[in-house]
Structures are given as C-alpha cells and as structure tokens.
Image (cartoon, rainbow, N blue to C red):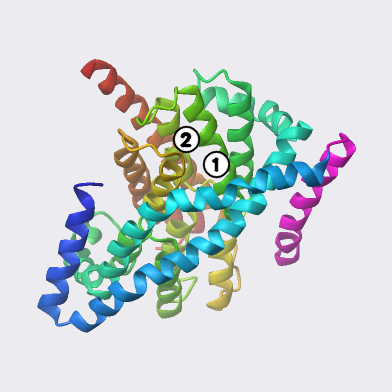
C-alpha cells in the first residue's frame, strides 16, 4: 500500500489537472474524511451488534456446531489449522457470506482474524492462514446475491435473480484460483527464507 | 423470493439468540460483552479506511476512472469483456458504494437483461471489494505486512471478470 496509495493519489491529481476537474477534486478531498467517518460510525454499530451475536453463538456452542458442519470445506482451505476456536469463527463468517449477510460477515470475520493473530503470537506479519482467509473473503461466494438482484429489479428486469447461478460458479472458480495462488505465494516465501 | 430474503436476517438473529437460551446461556450479558469490542474495532480500522477512501474519492472526482476506462476499452474487447463494464472492473475492487453506483448506471443504460447488463450483474455478484476487505480485516487486528494477500485477491477478481462473459454466453445463451 505504501507504493500503491501515492500512485492512486498522483493519478487523480494529474488527471484532474488535465481535464480541468480541480473543483470536483477539491470538493472530494473535503468531503471524503467526513463521509468516511459517517460510514465508520454506522460500521461501528453493525460491528457491535454482530460482535454481540457472535459472542452468543460462540458461548452456546452454535459456532462450534457450524464449524463441524463445514469442517470438510475448512480442511480443504486451511489444512494446517487445527485450532477449534479459529475454525468455529471462520465457519460463522463463511456461513454469513454464503447466505449473503454481508454486514454480519465482516464482524464475524474480524473475530476470526483476531483468533488467527493470537495463534500467530501477535506478530505484525500476516500468517498463511490469514492470507487465505482474506483472499477467501474477497471472492464473493453468495447463495443469494441480494444487492445485485435488488439493482436488477430496480432497473426493470423481469428476472432479477437470473444471474445467480453463473455468479455462483464464477465466484467459486475465482476462489479456487485465489487459493491456488496463495499456495504458490506460500511456497515462494518459504523458499525466500 | 423477496419475502424469503427479507425474512432471512431476522431468522438468523432469532436462531442465534434462541439457541443460546436453549443452551442456558446468559444471552444478554454475553451479548453485551461481545458488543463492547465493536467501537474499538471501528477505531482500529479508521485510519487505513480514511486513507483508502480518500484515494478512491479523489480518483472518482478527477475523472481518472472514466479516462482509464476509455483507454482500456480496446484491451477489454480483446479479452472478451464488453467495454461498458470496464469502469466496474476498475472500481469494484476499491469501493463497495462506488461499484454499486456503476452497476446501477450500466443496468439502466444498457438494460438489465442485455448481454452487457448480464455480464455486469455476474461480475458484481461474483466479486467483493477486495481493497476494502484487506484494509478492514488487517486494520482491525493491526497487521501491517500482508504478504501475498493483494496479488492473490486481485488475480481472483480478474478471474471473475474474465470468466463472467463466458458464463453468460454458456449458461444464459446470450451473445
């Protein structure tokens, strides 16, 4: 990000200078911070509520139950992760994602990341499991793509959920590709060391 | 379908709390204990998210997204992507609200069930805001070195983008 971030900002600046959109750019600079803080406040509310529900699910054993139900899948993606708590947290996040509960998935995923960090001895470097987990979360494997269906319906489609199956297949293939690349990345870092 | 979806979220809440009650948890106390961390997590995420969204907002306002999309249109056609979907491929890894806006525009301008509209829908339904996910997940736990996360996640996004038109053709029989 130390490389990418300045490049993005420089591109925006040069582009605005060339196209004469400097007024829009300065408006964006002013508004961005305030907009993001407003968003963060909403996010904090969602995080609190789902953090609370996640705690209940963990205490009652529902999370562990979920973890056992998904354990064949988890064994495939995280073959070296044996910790019961981390697997349960990941299972909750995967279920929420799969059911299209995006707002719920993030706090549940953060709980999983916290557990992974404890396992990694509080290091500031991402572990193999963390990388796999974040890559898995950046591929949207949804059973119900609620947002897309909503937008399609609003645009007047008679079949708002028509793209459900292709999107599911494409995202599963993308997930497979992402995880395969993770395996390559792990080999490369092992080789560097 | 819509009513089923609308019933879904409350059902999950009831299931979680109900199971806790059946298992004789002190559900309210446990909930409060878990909810406590939410604000701290949001605070941990704040700096990196402010930085990321500043760059995204500047890119959108400066017209850079539109300009790069126009430059990339020939390359997109070569890869089998409809040129109209290029802004979506540029923006959707960066910003969730931004990509929703772009998808809405594409659907309205081309029709939701045209080839372009279907491709854009599949792209939107099969990718997540990668940079946002990386920022939030690592920001929340204070991990700085993300190693091969970004390259792997961005490649996965592009697998989705490139496969979307193929699967629209195969499964929905549109050209």
How far across and down, in percent of the image, does residue A177 sit? 38, 36
Q: Which quadrant of the view contains residue A186?
A: top left
- Could you say which is closer to the camera, residue B46 or residue B78? B46
How far across and down, in percent of the image, does residue B69 sit? 23, 67
Q: Which residues are magenta?
A: B1-25
How far across and down, in percent of the image, does residue B80 sit? 29, 56
Q: Main secondary structure of the magenta part?
A: helix
Q: Which mark is residue B173?
A: none
- Could you say which is closer to the camera, residue A43 or residue B149? A43
Residue A104 lies, with reference to residue A191, above or below; the image says below
The residue depicted at 34 percent of the width and 31 percent of the height is A181
**Residue A101 in sight in this render:** no
Q: CA distance from mark 1 to mark 2?
A: 9 Å
Residue A180 lies, with reference to residue A48, above or below; the image says above
Q: Is residue A175 magenta?
A: no
How far across and down, in percent of the image, does residue B109 sit? 40, 79
Same chain shared by disc 1 and disc 2 = yes
The reply, left or right, for residue A26 in relation to residue B175 is left
Label 2, residues with CA under 10 Å away: few <14, some 14-19, many ≥20: many
């Amino acid at each position: 990000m130390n490389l990418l971030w300045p490049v993005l900002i420089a591109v925006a600046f040069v582009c605005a200078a060339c196209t004469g959109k400097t007024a829009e750019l300065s408006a964006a600079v002013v508004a961005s911070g305030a907009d993001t803080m407003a968003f963060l406040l909403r996010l904090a509310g969602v995080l609190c509520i789902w953090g609370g529900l996640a705690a209940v699910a963990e205490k009652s054993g529902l999370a562990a139950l979920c973890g056992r139900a998904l354990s064949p899948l988890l064994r495939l993606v995280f073959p070296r992760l044996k910790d019961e708590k981390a697997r349960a947290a990941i299972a909750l996040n995967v279920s929420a994602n799969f059911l299209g509960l995006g707002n719920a998935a993030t706090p549940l995923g953060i709980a999983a990341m916290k557990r992974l960090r404890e396992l990694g001895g509080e290091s500031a470097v991402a572990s193999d499991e963390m990388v796999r987990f974040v890559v898995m979360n950046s591929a949207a494997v949804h059973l119900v793509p609620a947002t897309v269906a909503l937008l399609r319906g609003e645009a007047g489609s008679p079949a708002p959920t028509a793209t459900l199956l292709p999107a599911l297949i494409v995202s599963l293939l993308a997930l497979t590709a992402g995880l395969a690349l993770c395996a390559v990345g792990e080999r490369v870092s092992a080789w560097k060391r | 379908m819509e009513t089923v979806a609308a019933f879904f979220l409350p059902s999950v809440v009831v299931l979680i709390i109900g199971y806790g009650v059946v298992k004789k948890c002190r559900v309210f106390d446990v909930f409060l204990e878990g909810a406590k961390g939410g604000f701290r997590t949001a605070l941990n995420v704040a700096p990196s998210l402010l930085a990321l969204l500043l760059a995204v907002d500047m890119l959108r306002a400066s017209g850079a997204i539109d300009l790069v999309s126009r430059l990339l249109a020939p390359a997109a056609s070569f890869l089998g992507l409809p040129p109209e979907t290029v802004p979506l491929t540029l923006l959707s890894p960066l910003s969730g609200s931004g990509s929703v806006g772009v998808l809405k525009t594409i659907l309205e301008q081309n029709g939701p069930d045209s080839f372009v509209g279907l491709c854009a829908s599949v792209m939107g339904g099969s990718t997540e805001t990668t940079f946002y996910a990386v920022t939030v997940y690592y920001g929340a736990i204070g991990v700085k070195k993300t190693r091969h996360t970004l390259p792997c996640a961005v490649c996965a996004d592009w697998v989705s983008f490139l496969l979307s038109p193929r699967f629209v053709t195969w499964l929905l029989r549109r050209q």
